[in-house]
Amino acid sequence: MVVELFLDLLSQPCRALFIFAKKNNIPFEFKHVELIKGQHLSEEFGKVNVLKKVPALKDGTFTLAESIAILLYLRRKFNTPDHWYPSDLRKRARVDEYLSWQHTAIREKGCRIFFTKVLMPLAVGQPFSPDKLEEAVKEMNFTLVQFEEKFLQDKPFIVGSEISLADLVAIVELMQHDPNFLGCKRFADRPKLAAWRSRGEEAVGKELFQEAHKQVLNAKSLGSMQLSSELKEHLKQILK
């Protein structure tokens, strides 16, 4: 049975799901939910995910929210190659360890940068605060040191010689903040991180990697986004 994936490739978790599903030939239907138009806030989408967030999955009458839960569901349902979520107890634990850590580390710090530089100025119509951006970038840089020392170390990938769900989730998150538009080049001054990113790109396939990241790598399109009135109001409430 074909599963429905509700995605917007502007979203980091959505890109991870898109890459994982396409790389593993998972039969899925791509349901585009445009974030900048506020489609995720609609009553109709709320029937799929009451949390009104993407990504979301619908498999027949079964629905599922949260990207990590969806990735693990697809891994188990379609029995994808073992390296994504290893059967080896300790390797799997390392994947779980990163996926548990990243929510309040790379993901949180990265979202703060994107909100500060891109979304909030579009929502309130005022320039971003350089001081707040500098503070957010410093926090991210400290987190990247932790990532390299704790999780990557001197290995090709987080759990050894092959890419895992942990690597995929980490790479798409960091790609969100690499474009020149954000002024936060994550890989330029970090050769270990850059080499890891290149291995990840090779592992999933360059064409697929570029397809998934086309929108976020286009700095001009990010700066000229037109947010819906519903999304602007939603972001203003978050700011408050």
Image (cartoon, rainbow, N blue to C red):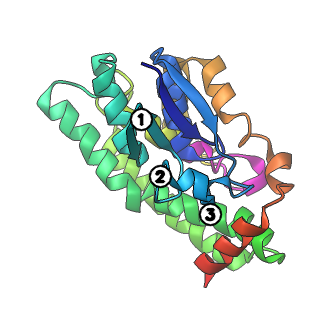
Q: Which mark is residue 49?
A: 2
- Element type at marker 2? loop
> Residues under labels 1 and 2: Cα distance?
26 Å
Q: Which residues are magenta?
A: 173-185
Q: Residue furthest bottom?
A: 240
From this view, report whether residue 74 is shown above or below residue 105. above
Going from N to C along the chain, the mark reached first, 1 or 2, is 2
**Does the magenta run of residues contain 176?**
yes
Q: Quadrant of the N terminus?
A: top left
In the image shown, does 16 or 92 lie closer to the viewer? 16
Can residue 154 be seen here? The reply is no
From this view, report whether residue 105 is shown above or below residue 202. below
For residue 201, what is the image quadrant? top right
Q: Amino acid at mark 1?
A: Asp
Is there CB contact under 8 Å for labels 1 and 3? no
Residue at x 56% of width, y 45% of height: 12
Q: Quadrant of the C terminus?
A: bottom right
Give the number of the mark in front: 3 or 2: 2
Is there CB contact under 8 Å for labels 1 and 2? no
Q: Which mark is residue 167?
A: 1
> Residues under labels 1 and 3: Cα distance?
21 Å
Asked whether, in this view, residue 123 is left or right of residue 99, the answer is right
Q: Amino acid at mark 3?
A: Ile
Q: Position of residue 221 (x, y in %)?
A: 83, 47
| Mark 1 closeness class: few <14, some 14–19, many ≥20 residues within 10 Å | many
Residue at x 71% of width, y 43% of height: 216
Give the number of the mark in front: 1 or 2: 2
Residue at x 21% of width, y 33% of height: 92
Q: Position of residue 153 (x, y in %)?
A: 34, 40
